[in-house]
Image: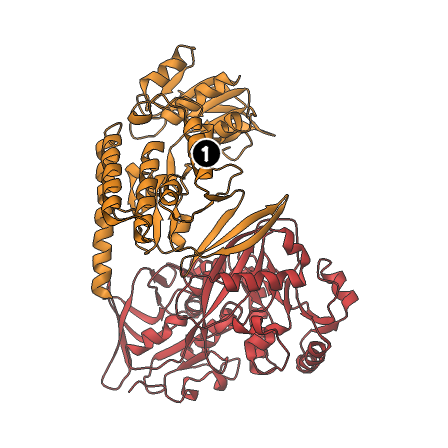
Amino acid sequence: MSAYDVIVIGGGVIGTSCAYHLVKKGYKVALIEKGDIASGTSSHCDAAAMITDKMPGADAALGYASIQKFIRLSKELDYDFNFDQSGSLYVCETDQEVEVATGYVNALRAEGYRVKMVDPYEMSQIEPLLAKDLKGGFWSDECAGLNPFKLCYAFVEQVKGKGLDVFLHTKVTGVRLNEKHQVEGVDTDKGSFTTGRVINCGGVYAPEIGRLNGLNIPILPRKGVILLSEATGPVCHQKVQEFGYMVTKFANVECDRDPELLKYNVAFTLEPTEGDNVMLGSSRNFVGYNLNTEIEVINAIAKRGMRFFPILKNMSCVRAYAGVRPFVEDHLPIMSEVEEMPGYYICAGHEGDGISMSPVSGQLMTQLIAGEETELDMEPFRFSRIENRFLD
Amino acid sequence: MSAAIEAASAGVKVLVIDANEKAGGQLFKQIHKFFGSSMHRAGVRGIDIGRELLEKCEELGVEIWLDSLAIGIYDNLRVAVDRKTGFNEHKMILVEPKKIVIATGASENAVRFPGWTLPGVMGAGAAQTMINFHRVLPGKKVLTIGSGNVGLIVSYQLMQAGAEIEGIVEALPKINGYAVHASKLTREGIPIYTGYTVLEAHGKERVSEAVIAKVNPDWSTIPGTEKTIEVDTIAIAAGLKPLTGLAHMAGCQLTFDRFLGGWAPIHNEHMETTVPGIYIAGDSTGVEEANTAIEEGKLAGTAIAASLGYLDEKEADALQEAAWERLKGLREGAHGAERTQAKEHQLHAYAEYMERRGEVG
């Protein structure tokens, strides 16, 4: 059966980025995907590469590194993924939020990122259709938008047949280990492959793949619902979010929230598309892998959207869709080799940041595999930080 | 409406939700007399059947929300409705019925060729709605694609409404609809181009000409046979497909059958889908015709009345049996054998699916 230097499991944005970066490094790579490219989380999300949704420290460093890589990738990849460095705006509803935001922005600025507080007047200049009664916000021109679906294809198309073989509709049934617990191959429902290294990029399905080898990868599917508007004239010019979003994301920033919003973790986000639709989000709740949308959540999102952009009241929603994000308790992805199983790597658990962190994740995994010095400290992302990481 | 009438006459409280400004679906644009396999209503105009059904609904106190869109079916049979509440005013309302009937009908198939998005290129059904319902002539010089009954009837009605029919294009080697409809057109000197297809449409603001050409049996076009026809409207009558969005969203299982227009929800003999409490009737479970839709609606209506305790079992069984008898008769016409087989296949697939689910559960 075919032999590869590295086998990547999962054709989402993380898997395709890993595959791309590995091939660029000279490795012979197989990408194995049980469905199609970008058929899961990577096509059921919105997308922006941001700093201003990251916690200062390792998280923000990863966000920044990703944006720099996107700038390069947008020139390097032949397939256009609609990268647009238009900035992003966070808005605050209360003085309390402004106060917390000021502290947050100062921390980011101290680390050298281009982000600044804006007052209501400046906000109305940046986004004229915003509600007029907001207290303030912060803005960064470093943030960018892109098309996540196209990004996955851009990664694959660039290297397919030039070091990358893609096996779609192929389900991994096992990762073979030798007596020293080293990886020696991958079995699928379509046949077996020989390899010394495998990366589990299964996202929300990474635990399922891990289970085959007794690994307990603590990733939970966290559902998010997004509404898509009809195509109109421009409504917003960049990603706009309420600062309350930070509360749902990290849950360690103190702000008062409406109980209805807390129930489904609803927070306002608005993103323009290149077709002049807007994507309105979002929610976060744990309801398994079910992709059904709930009408209560749709209602709450719509109501929240109209609060910040009153013009949405006059627009039609043409579609509501849900995706599940790979959630990890400490909000950091797992990007690491499994020490007890040499050659078994995991790159998963980016929750809502998978798209934005995909370039740097692919790069880091390639550096890990090549035994090179990684451009970021990998300590926070180690699998060994997980306490019960093996099944009984 | 047939389901609503059957259920309401047994005493069930019924609400009908319709996206259009008038209930009755396609019947109100069918100003022609029914023909052929529509044996028990042959000679009656669709518009009159529609009027009859509407009157009956009013008589039975069926509540009808018009200009109101059922945007989704959520868990526990809840239906979200964007209800019209006034001039230019809509409100989202969550309706929580005990049973749901999906009777969303079918939508027109598109034929894609360069220029197909130009203004003036439209579905034949859309052209028919414009002339017979809105009283607007879509254009003066029309080319029709497809010589099935819809293509033929709509062409004739467009001609009656004052348009010139420049021709009817049919890729098959012979006319696809009833000869009686076709001869009405050929008597007027309208050319029917059998064995032809449309290659492209040209135009700036709207379509101004169509290029057609002869096709080989393998559907490739024969170079040198191109003909350019000056038109301002192209009416596409390329068949219909069931509108399955709501059923699909609700989790109803679908099967594919080309004689029913494509993917359609499977159901049991009471028209109940694989989601308990959700029934389906008419073109949305397989494209047929108005009379079969009416009978399927009756099946769903009586089944619901019985399951809610408004009809005793014996009575319901008799009504259901009679409806099935009439359906059998209706499925003796054009493509009757194929349609009968396809509908049997749906019942079969339902039984298989439920059995499999029973084993798993």
- Would you say A207 lies left or right of B331 here? right
Q: Nearer the viewer, residue A107 or A243?
A: A243
Residue ID at (24%, 57%)? B354
Chain that is coloured red in the picture: A
Residue bearing the label numbered 1: B55
Residue ID at (77%, 67%)? A120
State the image coordinates of residue A347 (x, y, percent, origin top left).
Answer: 42, 75
Q: Is residue B227 visible?
A: no
Chain bearing tag 1 is B
At mark 1, the secondary structure is helix
**Above/below status of B180 relative to A354:** above
Chain that is coloured orange in the picture: B
For the C terminus of chain B, the quadrant is bottom left
Residue ID at (43%, 31%)? B50
State the image coordinates of residue A117 (x, y, percent, origin top left).
Answer: 73, 74
State the image coordinates of residue B330 (x, y, percent, origin top left).
Answer: 26, 31
